[in-house]
Image (cartoon, grey):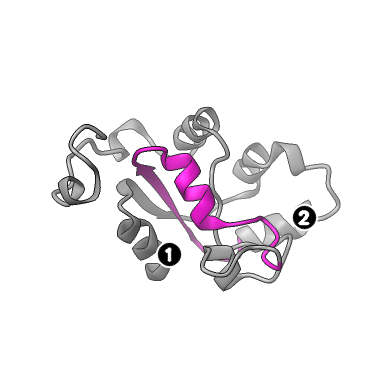
Amino acid sequence: MGEVINRFERRGLHIVGMKMMQLDEPILREHYAHLVDKPFFPKLAESMMACPVVAMAIEGVDAVQVVRTMVGSTNGREAAPGTIRGDYSMSNQQNIVHASDSTSNAQIELNRFFRPEEIFDFKAAQLGFIYGENEV
């Protein structure tokens, strides 16, 4: 977990919410509604319920695209070296990380996993060294 979190922070993304949680089948059916009818869904759900996960709310300029680039292709065998999946995955079905695919889906997912009071509005001290003057 620490290595993945560290990658996002080193890149200059701002973690404004983070918690460890145990997923259950109802929330996974909601989160992966588009996959529920796929033959691999039961195994996917089983693996995601095997241990707690860490949910993060991440901010930054173009954060969704930056995170998706850092995460890499869903198929770990095709993910570029240096990406999280490229370094830690060989599967097309099992991944150690999920990334929202759009800002609208990111908002839906944030609402699914976080209460409003679990997302913090604060300025990280290092932002002035990571972004240009008019970028944030």
Looking at the image, the residue that sits furthest to the top is: 104
Q: Image point 37% across, 44% down: which residue? A: 58
The relative height of residue 80 versus residue 123 in the rendered view (above or below) is below
- Residue 68 part of the magenta-drawn span: yes
User: Which structural element holds mark 1?
Assistant: helix
Which residue in the structure is indicated by mark 2?
42
Q: Image point 67% across, 65% down: which residue? A: 76
The mark found on residue 23 in the picture is: none
Residue 125, how many percent across, how many down? 13, 49
Which of discs 2 and 1 lies nearer the camera? The answer is 1
Give amino acid for label 2. Answer: Pro
The relative height of residue 13 versus residue 33 in the rendered view (above or below) is below
Residue 51, how many percent across, how many down? 54, 65
Residue 79, how many percent across, how many down? 64, 63
The mark found on residue 4 in the picture is: 1
Q: Image point 60% across, 50% down: which residue? A: 24
Crowding near the residue tagged with mark 2, few <14, some 14–19, many ≥20 C-alpha atoms within 10 Å: some
Residue 54, how many percent across, how many down? 44, 57
Quarter of the rendering containing residue 2: bottom left
Give amino acid for label 1. Answer: Val
Q: Which residues are magenta?
A: 49-77
User: Which structural element holds mark 2?
Assistant: helix
In the picture, the quarter occupied by the C terminus is: top left
Lower position in the chain sequence, tag 2 or tag 1:
1
Q: Image point 71% across, 68% down: which residue? A: 77
In this picture, residue 86 sits left or right of residue 53: right
Quarter of the rendering containing residue 10: bottom left
Q: CA distance from mark 2 to mark 1?
A: 26 Å
In this picture, residue 124 sits left or right of residue 3: left
The relative height of residue 92 versus residue 123 in the rendered view (above or below) is below
